Amino acid sequence: MRDNDAMIRSHPRQKTGRNDPCPCGSGRKYKHCCLSKGLAPTVSAESPWSRQRDASDRLTDEMMKFASRRFGEQIHEAWMAFNQALLPDSIDKYPGEQQIFFPYFLFDWDPDRPPPRRGQRPKPGVVVQAYLQEKASRLPELERLILDESIAQPISFYEVLRCDPGHGMVLRDVLIGGEAEVEEHAGSKSLRPGDLVYAQLCRLPEVTALSRMAPISIPPDKKAEIVGLRAQLRRKIAKQNRELSAADLIRYAEEIRTVYLDIRDALLTPPKLANTDGDPLVFHTLAFRVGSAQVAFDALAPLAWGVTKEDLLDGAKRNGDSSLQGVEFDWIGKGNRMHKTWENTILGRLKISGRSLVAEVNSANRARKIRQEIEKRLGLHATHLSTTSQTPEEMLKKSEEKKRGKAERRDAEADDPLLDPEIKREFEAHVQRQVEGWVHQKIPALGGCTPLQAVADPDGREIVEALLLGWERHYEKPGSPGTIRPDIDAVRRLLNLPVAIGTVIH
């Protein structure tokens, strides 16, 4: 029914002064107790936060015992309804999902509930209705308030605006607006500005609590789905000439949960790696027997679009009679179907050595195309010998099985061409041009608009800012020497967006 460490206050939290008594109850001054130990001041057992937490824990325990006794055999039915699926995966697949599912089971689930009519508030779920019939007269006032709020308040998506790890954060309701200052102990250590959570507020005297909160932290680049939901809900009430309200969120709770479930499942599904054509990433090696190195080179050199034969032969190996012994070059195509600003795309690598030809590509589609090109261009001068493939996971496994020692890794890093300052600068400039070219690309999350077009619309601007923040976080991850980290602020300036790393601006 609630996250035990998530408490939200509607008023600013007063800071503990250095000379004030330490809130942990030790009797010592704060500066000589928790402050000197680098600890957050412990919340007193008599604080409003603690009283509300204890009352909520008691109510949760009682309701769970009641639900187990009266509705235990129907919990799987409730799990199906929560997931909006006839055969959902076991709850064990979703770590921590109990903290968002059990409140639904206790307060919302009703197998016979018809869709609410316009202006009509949905009735409480069957579990809480039965519990109130049996226990309402004996509930303490505070527990009754918590129960009433858990029924009355909507569930929404909240964005973290500011965060004080270990103490609290400020949340904004993405769907209907409004901010709340959050005193929260555990989650604030892992959440950051720009993160989103699926949660419910519970407004009580002295303290406002999070009645429930999903266990997953939603990254900024998933905000497009939530902004799209907001636009959908606004269209539903468009004829009423008003803004979305809390009552609307209660009425459309199923639609809101659908978006949460889609995001949850997407985050828990391993990403599918793809190349720059959008094809699944599977590395293929094709081996051929050719008539001679020179014949193979002459036939295949045109596959390196935009590069002259003279440049391709710059690093070639020669026999004693100056005839071609071997050469390697990239298979290069003009442009790119996914990145319209790219002049070319490296599609693979061709290696010629004597009468041997090896083609390396990173997808089944490219493997099929390069084999067709080789056999078309060389004809009887090429014989296909074999094609092998391996997934990135298989490559990673082999790599782990053949781990090099520290000395070998240092040698490999020393040979990394990106550690050469001049080469690194050239490559950085190339990457930066590609990154800045993103503003002209049509993005599915923006409804097929380019970022330059999208920022003219408030919803589009909000999505673009979230995408940039997510992009920026990707490049925060530690990398090996020579890792290129593009300047995302340069993209913000191209879009006339505020430069605000780690801060959400609206």
Image (cartoon, helix red, strand yellow):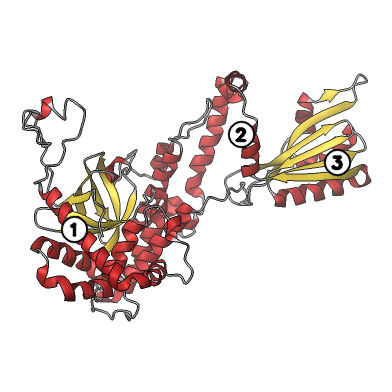
* Above or below: residue 494 compared with residue 238: above
- In front of the other: 256 or 374: 256
- Residue at 80%, 48% in the rendered image: 371
Residue placed under numbered mark 1 in the picture: 58
- Residue at 26%, 39% in the rendered image: 165
- In the rendering, at what x and y percent does residue 247 appear? 23, 70
Left or right, 29 with reference to 303: left
Disc marking residue 288: 3
Callout 2 secondary element: helix
Is the N terminus in the top left, top right, bottom left or bottom right quadrant?
bottom left
- In the rendering, at what x and y percent does residue 112 appear? 33, 81
Residue type beneath disc 1:
Arg
Residue type beneath disc 3:
Phe
Q: Residues within 10 Å of mark 1 (few under 14, many from 20)?
A: few
- In the rendering, at what x and y percent does residue 32 appear? 12, 25
Q: Are marks 2 and 3 in contact (CB under 8 Å)?
A: no
